[in-house]
Amino acid sequence: MYAYLKGTLEEITEDNIVIEVGNIGYNVKVSTTTADLLPGIGNEIKIYTYTLVREDTFSLYGFLTRDDLEIFKKLITVNGIGPKGGLAILSVMNADALRFAIMAGDAKAIAKAPGVGNKTAERVILDLRDKISLEDTLRGLGEPSSAALHGGTLSGGGSPDNIMKKEAIEALVALGYSASDATTAVKKVEVTEDTTVESILKAALKYMF
């Protein structure tokens, strides 16, 4: 129903925000990660929304990027993962990290979300692996995440940069790190003309500790 809301941030709690748009305050459920990345009260924000309409409820779920919204919509198609579970997962990992966890079969990383056990995490991987493309995952490494859009660090990169990042992530996973932790670390590495896979790997390892 609503593609997004753009207005003044009036209230922030751990899992809900209030946005005033045209003198109307909208309650929007958000992940703790999204809540942490929001600016202060009184600032104007834009939140992409998913509308849940049921016989006994009408709820809005908000996300800082379309990418987060799209991965949430995929999550809630999984049996046992409702909107609450989808937000819980996105509270412990961003969209990029979740895609890599799914592709790598890293159920342990997904199961870190409150209320999401190993069996449910494995179901997420089984149901979504064919819906997550390598191209989309690599594209995410070269585009700003919600954290980057709101003060985080992330360098953009073209296809060669994405390939080097992918190889660095694969090397970290081979060393025993989870796909989600490896992705998070690699995304923090600044890529320049002189960057190599080895330099990305060395820099990312510093963020692992």
Image (cartoon, rainbow, N blue to C red):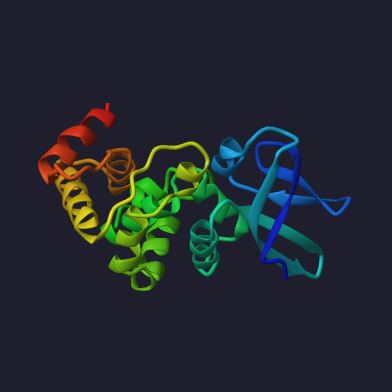
Q: Where 89 sits versus 52, above or below?
A: above
Single out the residue that lies furthest toward the front. 193
Is 186 left, or right, of 53 in this rendering?
Answer: left
Q: Position of residue 72 (x, y in %)?
A: 53, 60
Residue at image point 75% right, 36% down: 42
Residue 48, quarter of the rendered image: bottom right
Q: Where 17 sits versus 203, above or below?
A: below
Name the foreground residue: 93 vs 119: 93
Residue at image point 24% right, 43% down: 191
Name the foreground residue: 75 vs 188: 188
Residue 57, quarter of the rendered image: bottom right
Q: Position of residue 20 (x, y in %)?
A: 81, 48
Residue at image point 33% right, 54% down: 142
Screen quadrant of the C terminus: top left
Q: Position of residue 61 (x, y in %)?
A: 66, 56
Q: Where 154 sits versus 167, above or below?
A: above
Is 42 left, or right, of 114 in this rendering?
Answer: right
Name the foreground residue: 16 vs 128: 16
Single out the residue that lies furthest toward the bottom. 130
Screen quadrant of the N terminus: bottom right
